[in-house]
Amino acid sequence: MQSVGSVASFRKLTPAMVASQKLAMANDIVKTTKSEVAMALKKAAPALGIDGTTYHILDILIGLTAAEDWSQDRRPLVAISNEKLAEYVSRSSRTVVRSLRRLVEAGVLAYKDSPTGRRYIYRAGEDRQIERGYGLDFSPARQRLTELKQIGTEFAARLAQEKEAKRTISRLSRAMADLFRLASLEELEVSEIASAFNELMDQPMGVVDRAEALTMLHELLVARFDMSETTAEKGATDVAEHDVFFDRNSEMSCTEDNDVTPYNDTTSQDSWKKSKQQRNASKDAYINTSKSGYTRFEMAPEKEPESETRATSQKLSKAESLNWSEHVDPHESDQFSPLLSEVSLGLISSATAETQAAIGLDLSSWNSLIDASDDMRLLIGLSQKGWFDARKRVGDYTASAVLITTVEKALRDPESIARPAGYFRACVDRAIDGKLALHRTLFGLAASGSSVADN
């Protein structure tokens, strides 16, 4: 066989070496260039197992070939001794021999040995064509150009997939660790998912498979939290929607300090006191009704007379409309009125311009601020349960004021707050402890916002 006869007798042939010799002797020469083959080889080299010293030798050999020898009527030969290559790569001659054999068996090179085993090239003519040459032949790589390109493309895609899988594993591992801690605080049963997570992280497997399994576990854990939130919201709705604002089990005093200065300086003292008296009357009606056994959204017991039921409903509707009017005073309605004593709607509006622009909020009333709470909590990744708990703990107005302040700080400087939802919960805790100076933060935001606008 001609392809085998060009290999020196001192070499032991392998099937891979014979395959390379056949490619070198092919008649349908692929039209290509040196640079095209070199690029394809370098991209496919990792997939072919060519690395380290072998890759270094491959790079040297490609560089030693003449560009014109890659044409269809020529053969891309390179003649260099093993000793010279050993000097180039600072390795032993035996290492070079093993690397060359590796390149031949990978289908990149083919041996074209002289009878003596010496490598040399004789050129003749003005175009310096190879008249007689022996050495290392890149014809197999030229013939496999399309295949090498595909190998390189598939390897790059697999590498990108594995890289993304590693990022997914790192991201979801941290996220699930946070969710497990949250589940422990909220006494949510997730022990089965936690056990599966630990087994998955300890089990040896590919990064892509691990990322897929971890993604499914994460979705299952998030679904468990969603189910818990849905159950909590349903239970709260069944009791009474208004329980978010008032705790009917606690003692609520309707005594008011009529000498307190109104929070809005543009409102006259007489009109403010008049509206305050109206609100006191409506609150008295609400409290008396609650003590009689009625709730704001419940009908009277069947044994009550119809006229009394109708009168009670009218009182409740009137009280509800007053408490939900656009001119409601948050300092009286909220559980944490001292926190809002120095906070007006105008201050919040001037300090949160970016938040209003981001969600298209028209901050014309406290109710408009409350209505936008869902959009704002989504901006910082706060769950419905987290928002529900905050409202229940500090009241709707205080929670909304803290929420829009948190969103504004996160929008202005995202790097300053690593976890905005956690920052919001911490502010609520400080509000309960009486350590949250919300007005200072709002004044600072308003000042910094105005300075930026002036510049």
Image (spheres, helix red, strand yellow):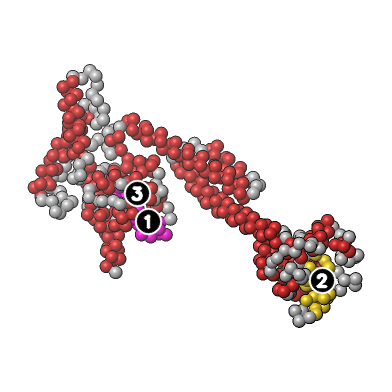
Residue depicted at x 72% and y 70%: 71
Can the viewer see residue 342 in this picture?
Answer: no
Label whose residue precedes the other's in the sequence (1 or 2): 2
Q: Foreground mark, 2 or 3? A: 2
Q: Main secondary structure of the magenta part?
A: helix
Label whose residue precedes the other's in the sequence (3 or 1): 3
Left/right placement of residue 12 relative to residue 180 reads: right
User: For residue 135, which numbered disc appears in the image?
Assistant: 2
Left/right placement of residue 409 relative to residue 368 reads: right
Label whose residue precedes the other's in the sequence (2 or 3): 2
Residue depicted at x 10% and y 49%: 269
Can the viewer see residue 19 in this picture?
Answer: yes
**Farthest-out residue, top:** 303
Q: Look at mark 3 in the image and give the residue it sits on.
A: 376
Q: Look at mark 1 in the image and give the residue it sits on.
A: 410
Q: Do the numbered discs 2 and 3 sit on residues whose CB atoms are within 8 Å?
A: no
In the rendered image, residue 369, in percent from the top left (x then y), is placed at 27, 48
Q: Which residues are magenta?
A: 397-417
Residue depicted at x 38% and y 48%: 378
In the rendered image, residue 385, in percent from the top left (x then y), is placed at 39, 41
Dividing the picture into quadrants, the one containing residue 392 is top left
Find the distance from the CA under tag 1 to the CA under tag 2. Answer: 67 Å
Find the distance from the CA under tag 2 to the CA under tag 3. Answer: 72 Å
Q: Secondary structure at mark 2?
A: strand
Q: Does 189 appear in magenta?
A: no
